[in-house]
Amino acid sequence: MKKGIVAMYAFRLTCLFLLCVIAILGCDASLTVANRTIGVSSGNFIYTDGSLTTNYNYPFDYVWKACEETLKEMKATGIEKDLKIAKGTINCVAQEEKIRIVVEYLSKDQTSVSVRVGISGNNLASQLIHEKIANYLSKVNRPEES
């Protein structure tokens, strides 16, 4: 009798766990542990501590140029650029919000971009900037592979 009750509770717990996993896979999800927040949106964006990060299938130089053009289009002021071999950072102000964009080389045709808007991070504004970067990149003509 006791084994049957334990088995029933184990079955219910397993079903609840699977239901939660299915719900999380179908939606955007985030996790907060102590003072760190990590989230995934549509499988493309990772939101960590106020910065929204995604990878673009373009070379580093193209993505860097797209970030510069995006900020120019937004009429950003006080632009400070720090470009190294495999990493670049742009700090500026647009519409009274501080913006920090970090561009990192991942491979020949893959680059990571992290956008943080404001002091604590604004997910919606960061996503808008990512959309503008992606829009600029979609218009770029890549040179033919030789």
Image (cartoon, rainbow, N blue to C red):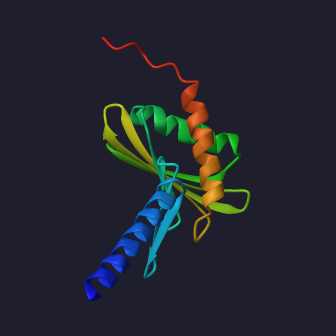
| Outermost residue to the bottom | 2
Q: Position of residue 47 (x, y in %)?
A: 49, 60
Q: Quadrant of residue 36?
A: bottom left
Q: Position of residue 10 (x, y in %)?
A: 33, 76
Q: Nearer the viewer, residue 15 or 39?
A: 15
Q: Position of residue 13 (x, y in %)?
A: 39, 75
Q: Is residue 91 left or right of residue 73?
A: left
- Residue at point 46% right, 70% down? 31
Give the answer, above or below, for where 126 lies relative to 122: above
Q: Nearer the viewer, residue 128 or 60?
A: 128
Give the answer, above or below, for where 112 lies relative to 62: below
Q: Position of residue 127 (x, y in %)?
A: 60, 51
Label total for image: 0
Q: Nearer the viewer, residue 53 or 67?
A: 53
Q: Is residue 5 left or right of residue 42?
A: left
Q: Quadrant of the N terminus?
A: bottom left
- Residue at point 49% right, 66% down? 30
- Residue at point 46% right, 31% down? 62
